[in-house]
Image: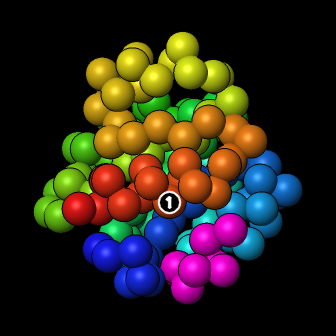
Amino acid sequence: MGNNEPVEILLAEDNPVNRIVAAAILGEFGHRVTFAADGHDALAAMRNNRFDILLMDIEMPGLDGMAALTAVRALPGVARKTPVIAVSAQGRDSREDLLAHGFDGYVIKPIDPAALFEAIEIATC
């Protein structure tokens, strides 16, 4: 995906304010965003739709980001190969652990738009 190509994004985020902020950032560049309120909703969306990338909050009630990633990677077909970027307020120290768990990138909250777009570009190339 080039910088100017719209991307189909699934955003798994339980906080409504964070969803609004991310949608504003991503929508400004023409990306199409679908929301999932938790890991269970994200899995259902991944089963029924095709996304270019999944942005996954790590700390969500019910099925958290780590467990949801494991479940996504177990899905049949192309869904399991969808790049998944961890989005978390856990700080820089968590980056290596999250990448080792299988995430394709990591963005720290509060979201820096430049870091988010860089992570999306790297994960979708």
Would residue 40 be seen by someone viewing this image from the given angle? no
| Place of residue 104 in the rendered image (x, y in percent of width and height, measured from the top left) | 32, 42
Decide if residue 55 is on the left or right side of residue 61. left
Image quadrant occupied by the N terminus: bottom left
Q: How is the image coloured?
A: rainbow
- In the displayed structure, 61 sits above or below 124; it is above
| Place of residue 8 in the rendered image (x, y in percent of width and height, measured from the top left) | 43, 76
- In the displayed structure, 49 sits above or below 40; it is below
Residue type at mark 1? Answer: Phe
Decide if residue 68 is on the left or right side of residue 99. right
Decide if residue 49 is on the left or right side of residue 32. left
| Place of residue 119 in the rendered image (x, y in percent of width and height, measured from the top left) | 43, 50
Question: What range of the chain is rendered magenta?
Answer: 25-32
Which residue occupies the foreground of this view, 95 or 12?
95
Would residue 119 be seen by someone viewing this image from the given angle? yes
Dot 1 alpha-carbon crowd within 10 angstroms: few under 14, some 14 to 19, many 20 or more? some
Give the residue pinned by disc 1. 117
Q: Secondary structure at mark 1?
A: helix
Residue at x 32%, y 76% (from the top left corner): 2
Image quadrant occupied by the C terminus: bottom left
